[in-house]
Amino acid sequence: MTEFLLEVRCEEIPARMLQPGMRELGTRMFEELMARHLAPRTVKSAFTPRRLVLILEGLADREADREERVVGPPVSAAFDAAGEPTRAAEGFARRCGVEIGELETVRTEKGEYLAATQRTEGRATIELLAELTPRVLAGLGWPKMMRWGAGQGPWVRPVHGIVALFGGKVVEFELFGVAAGNRTSGHAWLSAGEFEVENGADYGRKLARRRVVLRYENRLQRIREQMDKLASAAGGRVVEDEALLDKLACICEIPGVVEGGFDSDYLKLPREVLVTSLRDHQSAFGVEAEGGGLLPVFLTVMDRPDDPEGRVRAGNEWVVAARLDDARFFYREDRKVPLGERAEELRQLTFHARLGSYAEKSQRLVQLGAVLCDSLGRAELKEEVAAAAGLLKMDLTTEMVKEFTSLQGVMGGVYAREEGADDSIWQAIYDQYLPASTEDPIPQGPVGQIVGLADRIDTLVGIFGLGLKPTGSKDPFGLRRAAQGVVRIALEGNLAIDLDLIAAKSVQLYADGLELRGKEILEVWRPFLFDRVRYLLGLEGYAYDEIEAAVAVGGTNLPDVKARVAAIHSVRDEKGFLPIVLSAKRIANILKEGSEESFREEALVESAERDLHQAFQELRKNTERAEAKGDFVACLRHIAGFADVLDRFFVEVLVMDENTELRNNRLALLQSIQRVLSRTAELTRLVVDKGEYRDE
Amino acid sequence: MERLSLQSLIHRLSEFWAAEGCVIQQPYDLEVGAGTMHPDTFLRVLGPEPWRVGYVQPSRRPADARYGENPFRLGKHYQFQVILKPSPDDIQPLYVRSLEAMGIDLSLHDLRFEEDNWEAPTLGAWGLGWQVMLDGMEITQFTYFQQAGGLDLDPISAELTYGLERLAMFLGRTRSVYDVEWVSDGPSYGAVRHQDEVEFSKYYFEVADVEFLRAQFDGNEAESRRCLESGLVLPAYECALKCSQLFNVLDARGAISVTDRVAVIKRIRRLAVDCAAEYVASRERLGYPLLEAFAESADD
């Protein structure tokens, strides 16, 4: 059992591409080896910005030999009348590299055939590695690739060195003109110089001696520990930011943390601005005190272990001061023009070339907000919603948002707060882009939820109205996220409104600015929305058939749809529910091709059908009452209780009677029953286990 | 750390890159937005001929002008531009040595290469590379050109663009660009350039005559086309550069609407693309004279 050590040294790979690239390299190598039955016992990988490292342990030295039976011509064509081999037989033996005498006969469905057993000797693993390693490396799917020098590549960045050792022996191949060997080097300028390595352990040891921390996890941990220590020495704790920490662990080989300070006067800036400026410009963390206030301190990472003369600290402080100075300048400039006075500038800002400016969008949002308030029966919120909707997009004209687009919404909220807006209003502006990701909460209050809905519905309707929608991975207007936002706000905010009606209203607000008609737009909008409903309810643990059953009868009032799903989920395993599902399917089958018939009670003749009719009157009343209360569980239980009388009907009464009048009357009764059975959920959509069927 | 004046920085960089076989060129004698637009970059990176050049290029960004009041932003700044074609294998160590030539001791500093890709829509050009960060400050743009004038490049050129004001501010730890020493213990950057910033800011934002500039744009575009028809690629490219600069001034003046913008960029790009194609053809007609010139200097 032998070890394969692979290291590719190159110029700095972008931080965001490192982990996916390394994962792909490991997976592809593993798969290629598996395909040859050469599975390694362990796969270890590591990376720094300047190297990708893979160590496969426990590889066999050779592929197993293979035997393969090849079938040739039929025996009847292989020998002539004299029993001598024909040309066909000779040719076959020659192709297989065997003597005629070594050929065998096999019996197949079509008769007897000649066959040969071919033996292929397994190849040496080192040869296979020499062949597949450069192919796998060159084939990695980097999101952006480049060429260099005399046209080498394409790859993510120029390659400078390759170590490829199988059991200590060099695996000989070339990639982009670089020959694999046994030499590598330390950190590009802090511990430069080439040296030889013998195997994985030796490689790790020699790099550690040169202070290179090969493993991402170890760099991450070292950074975290040093930061925590420095932050607590400064009297606070690091402002958490996992994405930033991840990036920092991907930009160094020898991680060190540098602490810097800034003038405490900058603490007068809103916390959001400070934290964002430090993060976006300096890849630095803020430090907060016990009470949550920031300290005039930042922490960032350098690609070196220490800062012996304080040069790194001084440099970073100098840049941070310049950046914060910029931020303060933007802040002061922005404060000179209140949000409410930025309408003219907003008119210059295009929402979409064919849908007009953000000023026009804002006007629509004010009106759509009012419609939402009415639909929710919350007329008292109208004034606040109108105020928030009117100011919602104003911050797009501020210098701060032009500089830090990630602060859109947040900055508008901060400025509105400082201008003395009501809490509900500034908070609504602040929260408008929530939820931006699956981890984000929805906006805090009803005002924020209403304007958040209005904004997204306006965007979805507008873009759909131009005949545009996401295709494949392309979603330039973020429509999927917008729709997901609509669904989550409606569900988690428990906003019981018919979203179709709101969308229809939104179409009207565009007046004649859209290219598709309202009906066409709703036909795109509804399935798009319900894809997200299915996805999100699926995440909550509901089965897809439960969701389908509810979606089939529910409208676009999402809390209502969800209550139906939850009811099915809780009732479906109750004893007695399965029979009604089966009956519903049976009724659907009987009525599949039927036309609408009219019913006359007097035409019922059998006792079982009269009983059915009576029980049905009861059921109708009970389900109506339960639905009126929104109690879908009770409703489903009433429906389940109807199974017995239905079963008796089916046993004792022949629906498809020869007498047309009797038959049509029974069909009519079943049609009415079907309507009531599928009131809460379309029971026929529920998937029934075949095993359960047999038990019937 | 040495405190280098702006002009000694320029001297050091020129000497360093001259020693690496670069032609030390002079700035292009037209207003341009970046060193990349100098024909010794934009045109020379095309085609098969090797090329090594270094020069200072005053780079005009009208929209960044701040009336001489902002300590960091300028309507005109200086770039030291280096092109190495083909990009040599040891370009990174070479770059690191150029920093050492400026007195930056890397055993005391933090140097990092952060992903930063470059695209110039008006030139039909893009490349991949990094912004080079020294102690958290961006000091160089490092780009491997992949396309220029809409043409795939082969061989590939490496472009190093040093931001001279930033380097000088950083090395001198000055709070304002205007306090940078142009000459050691002599005139400051402000003494040499402040009036320039004030007047051009006022010109770009308040005074420039939109109709006049538009007419010039149209005129230069037509002239560029005429030159191309006569097979005069360098004059044609000059006219294209003038269009590009006129566009930047019109933009700063607020005279380009969002919808216009795309159309105007397209007009300039068309000129750049046609010049690039014509340049490639013209060099072929000349038999690629630089193939030999650089083969000789490489033997030295």
Image: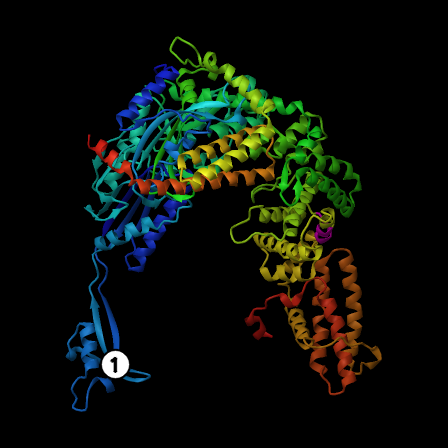
**Residue A472 picture location, percent across and down:** 52, 54
Snapshot quadrant of residue A312: top left
**Which of the colour schemes (rainbow, by chain, secondary structure, one colour) is used?**
rainbow
Snapshot quadrant of residue B230: top left
Q: Is residue A184 left or right of residue A418?
A: left
**Residue A126 picture location, percent across and down:** 22, 52
Q: Is residue B271 above or below residue A419?
A: below
Q: Which residue is mark 1?
A: A73
The residue located at (29%, 23%) in the rendering is: B16
Q: Is residue A382 above or below residue B254?
A: below
Asked if residue A497 lies in the magenta stretch, the reply is: yes
Disc 1 residue type (three-letter): Pro
Q: Is residue A518 above or below residue B7?
A: below
Magenta: predominant secondary structure element? helix
The residue located at (49%, 21%) in the rendering is: B72
Snapshot quadrant of residue A670: bottom right
Q: Most extreme residue toward the top, as rendered?
A: B185
Residue range highlighted in magenta: A495-504
Q: Is residue A67 left or right of residue B98?
A: left
**Residue B179 picture location, percent across and down:** 46, 13
Visible residue check, residue B57: yes
**Residue A400 picture location, percent across and down:** 58, 28
